[in-house]
Amino acid sequence: MKSSRLRLLVFAAAVLVGGLATASASAAPWWGQWGQNPQHQGSVNATGQSLDNLLADVVYDPFAAKEMKSQDGDLLIHYQTPLVDGNNVYMEYKSGNYSNITNWETQSWGEQKLSWVSGQLVSQWSFLSDWDPVPYSKLPDGPAWEPVFHAVVTDDAVYVPGAGGTIFKLNKATGTGARINPFTLVDSGTFVAGALSADNAGNVYYNVVKLNMQNPWGTDVLGAWLVKVTPVRRDDLRHQPHAVRHRPHRLPDRGQSRPDAEVAGVAA
């Protein structure tokens, strides 16, 4: 790889992202932002343009050359898929410091919004998260590829992973928002693991794992959860009593503005 930075290359004015799919009338589950099914057969009802012209060049990983050097020429990293929402593109970015693959947590991850303006893909805002990946492992039971930082876009917000099993709900226009915490604390040994996903109703789902940080990959996990965050507005609560009745954890008051969402269920 000749470039020292990994770039998001946009070759067509109408960007089509692999993994986005349209809902069907069948009873099969719809995986709109996660490949549609285990075979990744998701598609969109549109014809892409031929890859003839480079329209945008956006750097999202400035450490690509160092990462490849420390991995014997391989790039063992899971990256977010660019998320297209009308005229806008949401994509992860990396900053901080990189020394070697075994200490990937020294990097920082965030989400940025880019929009087409006068034929140019222009940055609108960036949000730096406090998310950390699970630690590197030399054991076969642990990760040797850098874990993915992956946001999800719904009709009214952008959700991104945060520290300690939390996520952030961001305003699409400003990139500002608040933390959603289904737990009582922000624990450094608890991690958002894998990509966030959403359904047609705007519910957000993600996995959380709690590790024994003294021996994270040689001992059993201390806890694992599937978290569901339901967007419930106060004036809608009377129509969705389940969002309150089955909510096992109340969002903590940490002096932040309360997000317009409730944690509807946490299952071990």
Image (tube, grey):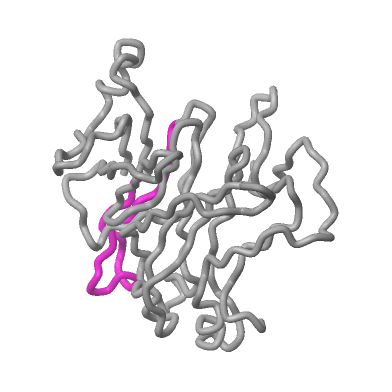
Left or right: where 70 falls relative to 57: left
Left or right: where 35 falls relative to 208: right
Q: Residue at x 48, y 75 (%)?
A: 144
Q: Residue at x 32, y 33 (%)?
A: 265
In the displayed structure, 39 sits above or below 232; it is below
Determine if the magenta segment contains residue 214: yes
**Camera sees residue 200:** yes
Q: Residue furthest top?
A: 238
Total number of numbered discs in the rendering: 0
Dividing the picture into quadrants, the one containing residue 172 is top left
Determine if the magenta segment contains residue 154: no
Q: What is the x, y in percent for residue 225?
A: 34, 46
Dividing the picture into quadrants, the one containing residue 139 is bottom left
Q: Residue at x 31, y 38 (%)?
A: 266
**Magenta segment range?**
203-225
Q: What is the x, y in percent for residue 132?
A: 34, 63
Left or right: where 18 falls relative to 226: right
Q: Residue at x 66, y 48 (%)?
A: 118
In the displayed structure, 244 sits above or below 141; it is above
Q: Residue furthest front?
A: 118
**Camera sees residue 18:** no
Where the C terminus falls, by quadrant? top left
Dividing the picture into quadrants, the one containing residue 193 is bottom left
- The residue lying toward the viewer, choosing from 153 and 55, is 55
Q: What is the x, y in percent for residue 240?
A: 35, 16
Q: What is the x, y in percent for residue 136?
A: 39, 75
Where the N terminus falls, by quadrant? bottom right
